[in-house]
């Protein structure tokens, strides 16, 4: 059963679990956990996804319940009027805050054929919320450092957050494509964590019916929450909103 965060006559917002595809894909044709199908069956209505989250990413996801609402909400995303905030655990200790302004080439889309080497502008803001160090030589260093970060994409490029964090040498833990396998395996064996540690926790948008501002929040859960507890980052997680506001995220 999917967790519904909000529902009215025009839209529904859910807390997407990690490991679920939004649509059925030829690149992952054996996957049976398909979000659109499961949500449609659960609420008994056709649903229109107006944005995407990667298979491994969890958190807030918005669906329209009619074509007019879908057009309105999709337009908000296209015009970059929607604000999204993510939490992630990354390798190393990035600066306390900053922006990553680096164009990204188009990657193959799991929902459509074709690929292009064309670059597109991409901008991400980040804020370090907490850090930890383990006296274990996971990689080439004598200790292993990790950080909890908040991320806000100002553009919506495919895998933008994962690619930008790799670009500044702080890849997201659990990222099999853009991360470091040795750290991913450390989290699997040390913490029993087998997922991408990236979650969309907050979305701000306007309701398609009357334009009122809405803020939807999904709490961190499952293996992600367990790792945060192991690291002693519960206080940092509780204070994340105020820390992000102070950093302009």
Image (spheres, rainbow, N blue to C red):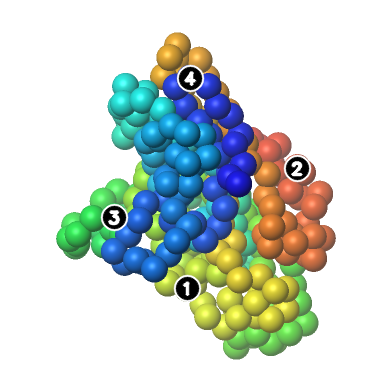
Q: Name the residue under label 3.
A: 111
Horizontally, residue 181 falls left or right of residue 139, namely: left
What label does residue 239 carry, if any?
A: 2
Is 238 or 61 nearer to us in this picture?
61
Q: Is residue 189 left or right of residue 154?
A: right
Whether 177 is drawn above or below 204: the answer is: below
Foreground label between 3 and 4: 4
In the rendered image, the vertical position of residue 28 relative to residue 21, given as above or below: below
Please tell me which of labels 4 and 1 falls first in the chain: 4
For mark 2, does the 10 Å Cα neighbourhood hold few (<14), some (14 to 19), or many (20 or more) residues? few
Cα gap from disc 3 to disc 4, whole angstroms: 28 Å
Element marked by disc 1? loop
List the single residue furthest toward the top: 210
Which residue position holds label 1? 176
Numbered disc in front, either 3 or 1: 3
Categorize mark 3 by other alpha carbons within 10 Å: few (<14), some (14-19), many (20+): few
Question: Going 23% across and 55% down the picture, which residue do you hit?
Answer: 112
Q: For residue 9, which numbered disc appears in the image?
A: 4
Q: Closer to the camera, 183 or 49? A: 49
Q: Please name which of the two marks, 2 or 3, marks the residue nearer to the observer.
A: 3
Instruction: Tell which tag, 2 or 1, sits nearer the viewer.
Output: 1
Front label number (4 vs 1) = 4
Asked if the residue under mark 1 is in contact with the one under mark 3, i.e. CB atoms within 8 Å, the reply is: no
The structure residue drawn at horizontal position 61% and vertical position 71%, both measured from the top left corner, is 194
Asked whether the residues under the numbered discs 2 and 1 touch, taking CB atoms below 8 Å apart as contact, a structural biologist would say: no
Q: Distance between the residues labelled 4 and 1?
A: 39 Å
């Amino acid at each position: 059963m999917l967790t519904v965060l909000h529902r009215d006559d025009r839209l529904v917002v859910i807390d997407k679990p990690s490991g679920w595809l939004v649509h059925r894909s030829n690149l992952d044709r054996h996957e049976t956990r398909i979000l659109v199908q499961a949500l449609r069956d659960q609420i008994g209505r056709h649903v229109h996804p107006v944005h995407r989250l990667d298979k491994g990413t969890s958190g807030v996801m918005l669906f329209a319940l009619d074509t007019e609402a879908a057009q309105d909400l999709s337009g908000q995303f296209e015009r970059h009027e929607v604000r999204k905030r993510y939490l992630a655990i990354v390798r190393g200790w990035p600066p306390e805050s900053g922006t990553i302004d680096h164009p990204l080439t188009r990657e193959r889309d799991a929902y459509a054929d074709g690929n292009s080497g064309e670059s597109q502008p991409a901008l991400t803001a980040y804020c370090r919320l907490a850090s930890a160090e383990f006296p274990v030589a996971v990689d080439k260093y004598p200790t292993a450092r990790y950080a909890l970060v908040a991320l806000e994409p100002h553009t919506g490029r495919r895998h933008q957050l994962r690619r930008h964090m790799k670009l500044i040498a702080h890849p997201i833990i659990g990222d099999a494509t853009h991360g470091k396998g040795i750290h991913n395996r450390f989290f699997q064996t040390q913490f029993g964590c087998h997922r991408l540690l990236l979650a969309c926790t907050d979305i701000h948008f306007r309701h398609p019916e009357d334009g009122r501002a809405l803020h939807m929040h999904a709490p961190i859960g499952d293996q992600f929450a367990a790792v945060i507890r192991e690291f002693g980052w519960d206080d940092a997680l509780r204070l994340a909103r105020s820390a992000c506001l102070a950093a302009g995220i």
